[in-house]
Each structure stands twice: as structure tokens, then as C-alpha cells.
Amino acid sequence: MTKGAWNALAVMLMALLFVLVVTGVSWPEGEMDDVSNEDLATTLFGEQNTEGYALVVFLVGLLLLVAMLGGVFLAKEEKE
Amino acid sequence: MIPLEYWLIVSSLLFAVGAYGVLTRRNAIVVLMCIEIMLNAANLNLVVFSSYHTVLHGWADPSGQVFALFSIAIAAAEVAVGLAIILSVYRRYKTIDVDKINVLRW
């Protein structure tokens, strides 16, 4: 057997293990929650009485900005 | 209605596909894409457990879906830096084969 075939076999065994673990648990049966966009927005930004994740949104935005600047800096052509 | 475990099985298989790609492929861009697949498997888990929160805990809580949004944003940042690093490595070594790039020295 080639190395690739062994790798594929190993990953298939891993996937099988995952499936066996998931099916081995007795999950409760029921309907999915009916979450609207409004509920999601309320959870994200909060309401007057509840605290949301607005600070986290700000930090993630900052992270995206830093990542963009870092990406531009790394990809910049070096001068000889 | 699709039972909870079916979603988890899909997520597991998605993770396994990503892991296979990371372990076997040599192209750095493909490896990055496979990491994203694994990340999406985790996001799917977050959304699924959040969607079945009432069944599991008795009340609805969409926090998991919000966390999935954050995770997607962080993945975007990771891709931006990852692709820039790959570009930089290609300029230096003229290859993006992960087996040939075995030094972390610049």
C-alpha cells in the first residue's frame, strides 16, 4: 500500500471513530429553535437591560484591521 | 426535522476531510483551505448546538451563532495573514511546497 492510501485509511478510521462517538450518545429529540435575525442582533448588541457582545465586535473589527495591515506589510515587495 | 446527531456527523466528516487535506497535501494554499474546512466544521458545531439549545437546556440562546460569526471573522484574519506569508515564502524560495520549506529562518 502506498503512503497516500495509508493516510486515507487513517483519516477514514478517524471519521468512523467520530461517527461512532456521535451515534453512541443518546441525544435528546426535538425541534430546532426558531431564531430570527432580530434575536441574533439582540444577542450580539444587547438591549437596554442586557449586555451584548458589542465590545467583542469592536475587538474583532480591530483584529481584522491589524490582520489586513499585517497582510499588506508581509506581502509588500522588498526593495533590493 | 433533521436530528441533532446528523448535523454532528456531517461536521465530523467535514473535519475529517479537512484533516486529510492538511496531512496529505503539500501545496500550502490547499493546506490553508483544508484548515478553513476544519474551522467550518467547528462553526457548524457551534451553530447546531445553539440551534438545539431549547432541546438541550430548555431555553433558547443564540450565543453559539454569534460565536460562529466571530469565528468566521477571525478565520478571515487568519486567511489574510496566511496568504501573505505564503506569498512572501514563494518570493523567497520560489515554491509553496510545505515539504520543501523546512526552515523557519528568513
Image: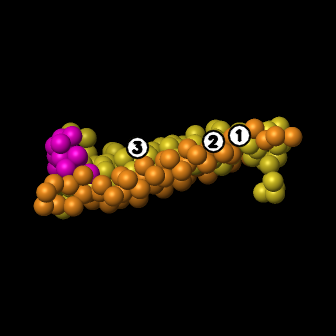
Chain ID, orange in image? A
Q: Which residues are magenta?
A: A29-44
The 10 Å Cα crowd at callout 3, few under 14, some 14 to 19, many 20 or more, is: some
For label 3, the residue is B10
Residue A28 visible to an observer of this rendering: no
Query: Is disc 1 in contact with disc 2, using a CB cutoff of under 8 Å?
Result: yes
Q: Are marks 2 and 3 on the same chain?
A: no
Residue B94 visible to an observer of this rendering: yes
Can you give x and y, in whole percent of width and height, for residue A38 in the image? 18, 42
Where residue B57 sits, quadrant-wise, is bottom left
Colour that chain B carries in the picture: yellow
The 10 Å Cα crowd at callout 1, few under 14, some 14 to 19, many 20 or more, is: few
Is residue B60 found left or right of A4 in the rendered image?
left
Give the residue displayed 13% in from the left and 57% down from the top: A48
For label 1, the residue is A76
Where residue A55 sits, quadrant-wise, is bottom left
Residue A2 is labelled as: none
Q: Is residue B85 magenta?
A: no
